Image (tube, helix red, strand yellow):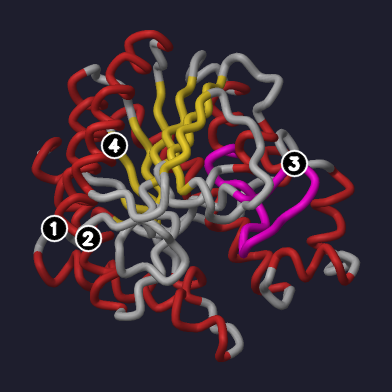
Amino acid sequence: MFPIAFHPIYKHPLPVGHRFPMLKYDLLPQQLLIEGTAVATDFFEPQKANLKDVLAVHTLEYVSKLIELNLDAKAARKIGFPLSKELIERELIIAQGTIFGCVKALETKIAFNIAGGTHHAFSNSGEAFCLLNDQAIAAQYLLNHKLASKILIIDLDVHQGNGTAEIFSNNNTVFTFSMHGKTNYPFKKEISDLDIALNDNTKDQEYLSILTEILPDLIAKQKPDFIFYLAGVDILASDKLGKLSCTIEGCKKRDTFVLSLCQKFEIPVQVSMGGGYSPEIKTIIEAHANTFRTARNIYY
């Protein structure tokens, strides 16, 4: 089994200016099915997350305002999406997809969420299209249910996982590692357990050299019994919101390296897709699909 969380509401319609980034949530599953990387039975449809699990990392005041659509104008602007009941439901379903994927990964060794990677959501606020932090919620779920005792979050989106860093800043059972663009959003960085800030226009060779030097030793030292991987493809040179210069092949090699380490050390891993904003949707789909193809080759 190759568990992949997907729910039709992931692609919930938004105003015209927000629709393009959402296309991938519909097109990516279709691509995986057409090419045979996944079969229909690989997909599961999560329901809404239990608020108790959400409140394990987010404050009651913030979550209540989200659900009641009662955020003040400044807080709502930081999120970037027009708030609606459907959008909040979507976020709760995405969070549950990551939670359920974790549980499945304990058996299958790897699981995916077509969406997720909402790492800019803080404990008490959201920003940059992130309302609830799916991997943080799922990590705390594993800890609270004693399904894991030490967790490593590998965040390779081009943007720093600032919300994740804040949520786990005083939690020594979760190690946060973010490798991101130095001059990119967020312009005020939080402090992860390990931050690697890359210069603009960093290319494949340098990117992969840094990652391959650091990650094996980090895993060996931290000895996690569960890994979360945020596999953003906004490291591509074509990305509108990234400032790095990696190729699709370099991005694929990155995924191969990370997932091969998880498989080698026999550590279950949950993968959320994260960002991808290249001008052509086919570029985004190809880069994301490579993550799934890589996993299929390594694990099956």
- The tag earlier along the polypeptide, 1 or 3, is 1
Q: Which residue is mark 4?
A: 110
Report the Cα–Cα distance between label 1 and label 3: 36 Å
- The tag earlier along the polypeptide, 2 or 1, is 1
Q: Nearer the viewer, mark 1 or mark 3?
A: 3
- The tag earlier along the polypeptide, 3 or 4, is 4
Report the Cα–Cα distance between label 3 and label 4: 27 Å
**Crowding at label 4, few (<14), some or many (≥20) Cα neighbours within 10 Å?**
many
Q: Secondary structure at mark 3?
A: loop
Q: Is residue 296 above or below residue 190?
A: below
Q: Position of residue 116 (x, y in %)?
A: 48, 54
Confirm or deny contact between disc 2 and disc 1 (CB under 8 A).
yes
Q: Amino acid at mark 1?
A: Thr
| Nearer to the camera, 157 or 113 | 157
- Could you tell me how many numbered marks the image carries? 4
Name the residue: 26% across, 55% down.
246
Q: Which residue is mark 2?
A: 289
Outermost residue toward the bottom?
16
For this view, does 132 lie left or right of residue 208? right
Report the Cα–Cα distance between label 1 and label 4: 14 Å
Q: Is residue 14 above or below residue 277?
A: below
Over which residues does the magenta segment extend? 120-137
Q: Position of residue 92 (x, y in %)?
A: 62, 56
Report the Cα–Cα distance between label 2 and label 4: 15 Å
Q: Which residue is mark 1?
A: 37
Q: Position of residue 58 (x, y in %)?
A: 75, 41
- The numbered dot on residue 123 is 3
Name the residue: 24% across, 17% down.
265
